[in-house]
Amino acid sequence: MIVWNADKFLVSGTWDESYALANAAAAQMTLDEKMGIVAGTGQLNPARRCVGDTIAVPRLGIPSICFQDGPAGIRLSKNVTGFPTGINVASTFSRRLMRARGVAIGEEFRGKGVHVFLGPGLDIMRNPKAGRAWESFGPDPYLNGEGGYETVVGVQSVGVQTCSKHLLANNQEHWRYGLTANLDDRTMHEIYFYPFLRTIEADVTSVMCGYNRFNGTSSCHNAGLIGPDGILQKAGFKGFVVSDWGATHDSAADNANAGLDMEQPGDYILVGGGIYKGGLKNAVNKGAVSTDRLNQMVARILAPWYHLGQDSGYPPTNFDAQKPDGSGDRNLRVNVRSAAHTALVREIVSASAVLLKNNKTTNAQGTVIRGLPAVKGVAKTVAIVGQDAKLPNLNCGDLNECNDGTMSVGWGSGSNSLEFIVPPVDALTSFIGDSATISTSLSNDINSAVNAARGKDVAYVFVNAMSGELGFYTFVVGNQGDRNDLNLWWKGGSLVESVAAVCNNTIVVVHSVGPVYFSWSNHPNITAIIYAGAPGEQTGPGLVDVLYGAYNPSGRLPFSIADTESAYGTTIVYNSLGFPEIDYTEKLLLDYRYMEANNITPRYEFGFGLSYTTFGYSSLSISSTSSGYTVSFSVTNTGSVAGTEKPQLYLGYPPSAGEPPKVLRGFEEVDLATGQTKTVTISLTTRDLSVWDTPSQSYVRPSGTFTVFVGASILDIRLTGTI
């Protein structure tokens, strides 16, 4: 019987009950049937229906288990929603929206008959140019952990399995198929493993090991990560470990004995793989892998299937990832889009928009005539400028490997099905209607842009920067996965400056996968700037809601924006004679942690974001509880319109702890009417006040005085207290 537990997980009994069913099923299988469970059917197999799948065992009622990309919605299928990316949901600083997005994604995956959602992505943004960092939740481990936790809870609440990825320290695309990430035990636990720990606490059903080597050993062959005494098992992980596609580089026996339960896609695909087909069976027959271990692998894969009730009433797979155009008899064209999902995506677009600058001017009546929020009808002449404003090519390959219009998602397996998108130019034109004369220049040609914008009452300029996954010789505008630099693409900075030179009310919208240079931000004619991220299919409508005041912006930066790459303290290794060894010498000092430790002031700091109203903080109190501490304070809307504040709690450790100056340990979402005050309560657990102690292999609270910082960003601290 399927029941709801207290945390809204949809479960079919306990893990013990699920394992009893899984073990019983494994005991009835032949050796060949077990092989079909632990290895994918093959990337080159015409029978493959999903990006990865297994072989069904009909006599036991076990279907082919379907694995499908990706973190931002279903890829390679029609009639699905293009959800906002991980970096955008991080920008909301809203657990409510993180979970709601997970629920909606889960509903669509279930509707398509997908058993395993290949997400959430948890790869820390170690360097701002990292190609796939937008799939995850930024450089901060706490924010990544909360994004991962809420995503898993949301997706699994509707009975769809989740797969946290990529274990571990998978932080750049160049050389990813074999580079070694070298890092110490404390850094591993406090930064790179911490988000995985949070998803384990959310009951995640599977974990994907990455292509890279970790401290010299391939991640999918690293017993310290995935083995019976590895960090996953010690953290209470109950599910199975699956390889990234082609990430098995050692023998079948070595990988199986190290703790790898399933290999995908099941055949050799240029970068690796194919070791379990034949090789594992031979290893079992020769005794190199025990029958007990093989049975354990099968049970670990089937237990989550039982645990989430997928053995009863689950929709059959109804699409064909090998024919993403929707053709063929296996594509049943089931429509999983809904009005509720569209509305949610639009809300996340608005909630993730970060207002970085707003020099508004009002007339005698108090109406905004320059800056934001714009008032429909006040501007009689409007220019919409930039290639990023227009509809992109919606048939740009299976990986979305181009950037020729508005940027809603990066490229690669973490992309979504760009079947439908409302670009900014369409949303703006529809909203403005006949209230103004609109001029457009939907390229990044500077002469055309200047002619369109000169003397207009307002000019909206759209610019972007994109990145993605390292594919097989995939270059997008000269970038191979990781970005080459932190510049805007298509000379976007020059475009902004040229428009600002001829229009004294220039409003800039930046769509980007991460930090970019904002050297032009102080131009006096640039009255407002919005960082809009990679927001998914409702990019235009959600943005118009913010520009014209239907939604008061509340997005906060999930990373810092600095003026030099050196301000981040890390680099991408592009050139190497063979697979490089990358030493994580920065240890705990990423992004704002590095900047504060080195007295670097960014242009826009972590957690920063403006509103159309203002907020006041007061009445900090800290009390001890049986499980830690409770921090309470008041937030008041001191402005003239309703708004949502995102208060953040940072912790300063005793000097002896060896921690960064401040680390994020809490955030909340507070809706406030004009003049309203609410009490905000944030709990600090014992672990929140602890550091990883390598000798004891545990979190230990250091002795001494802690400082509690509460404020609107890492640099905008309003209240302080001590523990």
Image: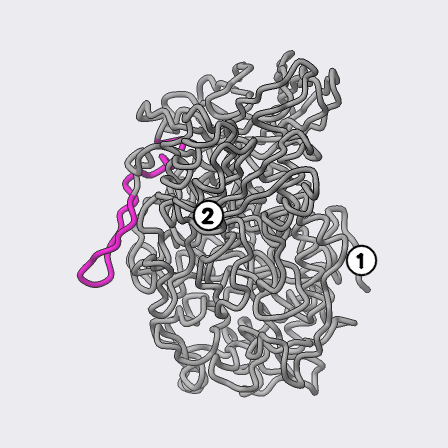
Q: Horizontal and vertical percent for residue 216?
A: 28, 58
Nearer to us in this view, 50 or 324: 324
Determine if the magenta segment contains residue 576: yes
Magenta segment: 571-594
Question: Which percent across, then down, holds residue 391?
Answer: 55, 57
Q: Residue at the location (57% across, 56% down)?
A: 72
- Looking at the picture, which amino acid does disc 2 mark? Val
The quarter of the picture where residue 634 lies is top right
Q: Is residue 685 above or below residue 163?
A: above
Look at the image and say whether residue 230 sits in the magenta stretch.
no
Left or right: 126 as drawn, with respect to 680:
left
N-terminal label among 2 and 1: 1
User: In the image, is 673 to the left or to the right of 249?
Assistant: right
Name which residue lies at 53% across and 22% down: 359
In which quadrant will I find the N terminus? bottom right
Which mark is on residue 3? 1
